[in-house]
Image (spheres, rainbow, N blue to C red):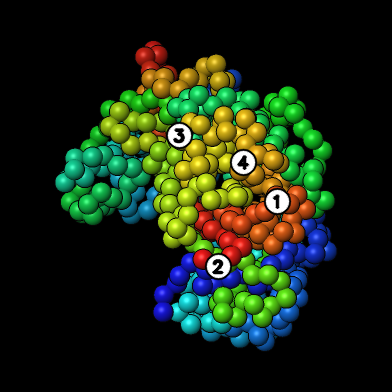
Amino acid sequence: MSSPTKNHPHPAPTNPIQIPFLGNRPKPTPETLHFWEGCRNKTLLLQRCPDTGRAYFPPRPFSPFTGNRKVEIFAASGEASLYSYVIHHREVPGFHPPYAIAVVELKEGPRMMTNIVDCPQTPEALILDMALEVKFYPIDEEISLPLFRPAGRAE
Amino acid sequence: MSYQPGSVAVVGAAESTEIGNVPGMSQIMLHADSALNAMADAGLQPGEIDGIACVGPMMPQQIAQYLGITPRWVDGTGVGGCSFLLHVRHAAAALAAGYAKTILITHGESGKSRINATPRPLEPESLAGQFEAPFGTHGAPTLFPIPVLRYMKATGTTDEHLAMVAVVQREWAARNPRAMFRDPITVEDVLSSRMVAYPLRLLQCCPVTDGGGAIILTTSERAADFPSPPVYVLGSGESAEGTLISQMEDFTTSRAFRVSGAAAMEMAGISHADVDHLMIYDAFAHLPLFGLEDLGFCQRGEAKDFISAGHTRAGGQLPLNTNGGGLSYTHTGMYGMFALQESIRQIRGIAPAQVPGVRISVTHGVGGMFSSSGTIVFGKEKP
């Protein structure tokens, strides 16, 4: 694994991921490479079914609704809401327990697993349906993880 | 020939001689020990078995050779902890079709002692490796409870309701000498136990244990020739949703549960009121709530009140998880076999915490994290 990039303000109490990243690094496949390249370029790319207009996730080169291969890749808004989560209390490589493992619902419809950053990892701070926005977290030169933080915070 | 309710029966069933902490047996021997116990129960020798089902790649042939069985029907369906329920369903169809005459289903898992245990590698190119694991998932406790907060919000279920699931099952376990945990617990005990993955605490999560179980099925025409009273397979169902819990269609209900449960009930031609005894695979405390609702025993959001009102306790209208469940009895990693065994014992009338007069028992299983599902309806009488 290459070294993490610099310039990440990550106060430990509100951010669950340790630096450098010691967790499970995702390895893109031909079907998902565009998504990870999008994350590296700070864009959340989704795909849309040409027949139903519905967005879907995770990436695949055909519509899970109709099987149509002529799918469109588009940039999502990055807006989401907190759908559900757990706060894990045990030691896991790469994470500061307790930390939340969350599922967010994107404004475009699909849900995805993520971590919530810039936010205390507590039930009091993590309110279901709270507004979130994507924040990309580079773990090396190739991979940036799409994480989410409470919406409307200043940089 | 096609499968009809009651045309196939369980004629042999047993668990491993020891259960819980079994450092003296490797995983394959837990399979064999359970199989030998089930064959003894049925009065059979390995040479009389002609069909075999075990979970996962390369396992049926390994167990067949180890036990000295020459199968002409093989099933390696591996969809997680409910695989054995699918094996029963597939075996029923195979017996009805004449593919085999006497089928053995085995489970053995050295989940605690990890002697020749199944490795569970995480492939970083897999969907889970790319879209779940990077966010700090670490086994079932980090994944299976993820829908719980959404379910609680949608249904008004509280921490106390979820604690009651564990409390009631411990009451059953207290009556079972083989249960891993038998000391009575209170809601306060549950809610003061160590937090594992909020909102679930230690007493709402299953242990990881060693053990095994085996089941022998044959056609009902032959079932009367065996020493134990037959337990008829009246209906069955199966389904699957996916391996990513983050992509579960609805966090308040399992599609796989609904499809599997409805198929089994319909095939058996029974109503919910006909069910005397129920087993719902409970790796975590929320599963009986989902199961009761998704199988139609309760309306959406009412399972919490059903359990809190005592309906699943001893003497209640629907005794549930009467061995103590995965939470208190045992959980090797794939608990479905033990849920089946308890349903069979209850029909036979030999369970440690026997419910009086069980004529119909339903076993409902889950695989992975709401990944897959299987349901079996057992009956004391052939329809």
Residue B317, disc = 4
Q: Earlier in the sequence, mark 1 or mark 2?
A: 1
Mark 2 burial class by Cα count in 10 Å: few <14, some 14-19, many 20+: some
Q: Amino acid at mark 4?
A: Gln
Mark 1 vs mark 3: which is more N-terminal? 3
Q: Which residue is mark 1?
A: B356
The mark that comes first in sequence, 3 or 4, is: 3
Q: Nearer the viewer, mark 1 or mark 3?
A: 1
Q: Label 4 vs label 2: CA separation? A: 23 Å
Q: Is residue A75 left or right of residue A27?
A: left
Side (left or right) of A128 relative to A20: left
**What element does badge 4 sit on?**
loop
The amino acid at mark 1 is Pro
Amino acid under disc 3: Arg
Q: Which residue corresponds to the image point at 51% horizontal and 66% vertical from the top-left?
A: B383
Residue hosting label 3:
B300
Q: Which mark is residue B382?
A: 2
